[in-house]
């Protein structure tokens, strides 16, 4: 029950999605491939952005540490009395805050950096052979300037076993301090002369934040140069060429998709055009059997089908023509023998039947002739052709000449067709309208087909009684007549509409019959432009 209740909305949603999709196979293929390209590009963009974030973050850290070293180097070379003024005059980055203080930064948990930062003793001017020098690399003497140990038995600043005096967090143990790694930009301090090296360096950082603090104890006045800075978040799209290269790759990929889909779908369009041409002309040129294996197989199958259709149509036409031709001789012989019948009434009836048979044979031969004629397709003015058909119909039936009307289009309409066959088909329809409807009205207009293809519609209307709806399509079958008396004066052979439809379909068109609301019958002829 639940499935039944929710199935229709799901179906409606699916139909709505399908309705939004393009109708052509080429457009759907392009949409699918371009959507896939966008997904791949987005994934690549994400990976690149994440990688760029890591690199940019490292570069920002390196730059900030280089600024800190440069500022310290600039100030430590000045006399202590000039450092405050020089610090105020320095162009400090906007994310830096620098002060001189009597103690290091205690706002962020930090670690002592062992001096001289892992440098070779020879490089830092110390005693060779790795000998200990109390003046380098170790803590200052107890009780001396800058001593924060608090005396014997007390933990060093900033109090590993208790809170610092200002309530800040404590620093790691001595063991951890000795394992601290000095960042490469600050490692340059080890290259400074001994008189310029800081007595102590503390790096402070709170995990999970981008705030850092560097505290340098000056070597002469033992004050602390405290630098607080914030590492700015990197911009994943900071590169000026990043978006340009991304756009260029997307455009190039989209262009290749459009070109490739055109190459892939082109054989389908060629096959459709060939099928349309075969419908208009059974003797149309075969498809070229070239290209990839699948395309060649489709072309071979289509050409085989076309050859079979041509053979079937030719065999049928030849059979009808042969039968009609062979019947003319015995009919002529029967006419000659009928002249020897003494009974005039019987002879007249006999000859009337033979005349009807002869007309049927003639219509059959005309049907076969129209089906087998290979008249070339030529460009013609349809408006002029319809005017000629209307004029000839009025001349053929002078008693109904006033009831023949033709409404030409505002502008001439040119089509490609077999002019003689088309004229015979249209004349047949017009004469049928005059014969059974007593009048005919011809009009023409350009219309759009089911697939939005441009076509021309010729309407041939009469004012007769019309036909029952079930007989409208049956009238196009050979030897079928709406008038069932079999009297040639009122009926006919029943091949006129069949010949007209066969001719029009052979040119890519069609003809249908409909009853008019105001009375009468309408023959609608559709022809491609």
Image: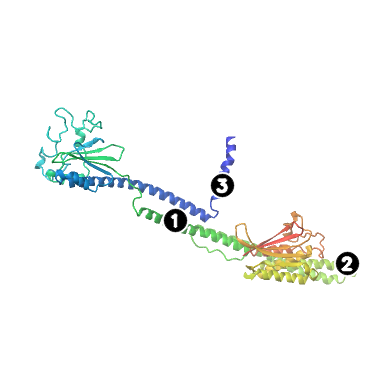
SS for tag 2? helix
In the image, residue 397 above or below residue 241: below
In the image, residue 277 above or below residue 128: below
In the image, residue 109 above or below residue 489: above
Residue behind mark 2 = 346
Q: Quadrant of residue 368?
A: bottom right
Q: Residue at x 16, y 30 (%)?
A: 150
- Label 2: few (<14), some (14–19) or many (≥20) C-alpha neighbours in 10 Å: few
Q: Are marks 1 and 2 in contact (CB under 8 Å)?
A: no
Q: Nearer the viewer, residue 197 or 514?
A: 197
x, y percent for residue 284? 59, 65
SS for tag 1? helix
Residue 367, numbered label: none
Q: Quadrant of residue 490?
A: bottom right
In the image, taking residue 333 as reference, residue 415 lies left or right, namely left
Which quadrant would the N terminus be assigned to in this image? Answer: top right
x, y percent for residue 205? 26, 38
Which mark is in front, 1 or 2? 1
- Label 1: few (<14), some (14–19) or many (≥20) C-alpha neighbours in 10 Å: some
Q: Residue most toward the right?
A: 343
Q: Earlier in the sequence, mark 1 or mark 2?
A: 1
In the image, taking residue 264 as reference, residue 139 lies left or right, namely left
- Residue 52 visible to an observer of this rendering: yes
Residue behind mark 3 = 16
Distance Cα–Cα, label 1 vs label 2: 85 Å
Q: Are marks 2 and 3 in contact (CB under 8 Å)?
A: no
Q: Residue at x 80, y 71 (%)?
A: 333
The count of marks equals 3
Q: Earlier in the sequence, mark 2 or mark 3?
A: 3
Q: Nearer the viewer, residue 286 or 54?
A: 54
Residue behind mark 1 = 254
């Amino acid at each position: 029950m639940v499935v039944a209740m929710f199935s229709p909305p799901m179906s409606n949603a699916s139909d709505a999605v399908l309705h939004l999709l393009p109708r052509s196979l080429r457009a759907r293929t392009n949409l699918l491939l371009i959507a896939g390209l966008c997904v791949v590009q987005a994934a690549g963009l994400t990976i690149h952005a994440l990688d760029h974030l890591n690199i940019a973050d490292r570069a920002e850290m390196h730059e900030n540490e280089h600024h800190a070293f440069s500022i310290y180097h600039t100030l430590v070379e000045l006399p202590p009395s000039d450092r405050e003024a020089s610090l105020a005059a320095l162009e400090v980055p906007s994310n830096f805050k620098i002060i001189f203080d009597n103690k290091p930064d205690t706002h962020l948990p930090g670690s002592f950096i062992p001096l001289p930062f892992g440098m070779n003793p020879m490089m830092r001017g110390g005693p060779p052979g790795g000998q200990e020098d109390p003046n380098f690399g170790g803590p200052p003497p107890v009780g001396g300037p800058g001593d924060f140990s608090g005396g014997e038995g007390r933990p060093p600043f900033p109090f590993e076993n208790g809170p610092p005096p200002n309530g800040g967090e404590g620093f790691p143990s001595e063991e951890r301090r000795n394992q601290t790694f000095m960042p490469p930009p600050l490692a340059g301090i080890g290259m400074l002369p001994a008189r310029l090296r800081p007595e102590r360096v503390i790096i402070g950082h709170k995990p999970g934040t981008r705030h850092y603090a560097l505290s340098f104890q000056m070597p002469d006045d033992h004050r602390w140069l405290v630098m607080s800075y914030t590492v700015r978040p990197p911009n994943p799209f900071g590169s000026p060429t990043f978006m340009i290269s991304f756009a260029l790759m997307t455009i190039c990929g989209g262009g290749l998709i459009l070109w490739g889909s055109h190459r892939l779908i082109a054989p389908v369009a060629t096959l459709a055009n060939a099928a349309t041409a075969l419908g208009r002309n059974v003797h149309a040129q075969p498809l070229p059997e070239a290209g990839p294996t699948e395309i060649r197989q489709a072309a071979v199958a289509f050409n085989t089908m076309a050859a079979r259709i041509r053979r079937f149509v030719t065999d049928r036409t030849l059979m009808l023509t042969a039968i009609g031709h062979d019947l003319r001789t015995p009919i002529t012989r029967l006419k000659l023998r009928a002249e020897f019948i003494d009974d005039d009434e019987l002879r007249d009836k006999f000859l009337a039947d033979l005349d009807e048979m002869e007309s049927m044979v003639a219509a059959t031969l005309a049907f076969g002739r129209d089906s087998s004629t290979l008249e070339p397709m030529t460009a013609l003015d349809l408006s002029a052709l319809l005017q000629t058909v209307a004029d000839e119909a009025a001349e053929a039936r002078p008693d109904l000449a006033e009831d023949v009307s033709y409404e030409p289009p505002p502008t001439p309409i040119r089509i490609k067709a077999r002019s003689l066959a088309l004229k015979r088909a249209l004349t047949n329809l017009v004469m049928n309208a005059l014969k059974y409807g007593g009048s005919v009205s011809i009009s023409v207009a350009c219309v759009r087909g089911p697939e939005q293809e441009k076509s021309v519609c010729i309407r041939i209307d009469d004012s007769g009684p019309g036909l029952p709806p079930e007989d409208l399509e049956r009238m196009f079958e050979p030897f079928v007549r709406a008038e069932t008396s079999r009297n040639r004066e009122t009926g006919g052979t029943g091949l006129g509409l069949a010949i007209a439809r066969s001719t029009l379909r052979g040119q890519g068109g069609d003809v249908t019959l409909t009853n008019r609301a105001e009375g009468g019958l309408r023959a609608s002829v559709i022809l491609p432009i």
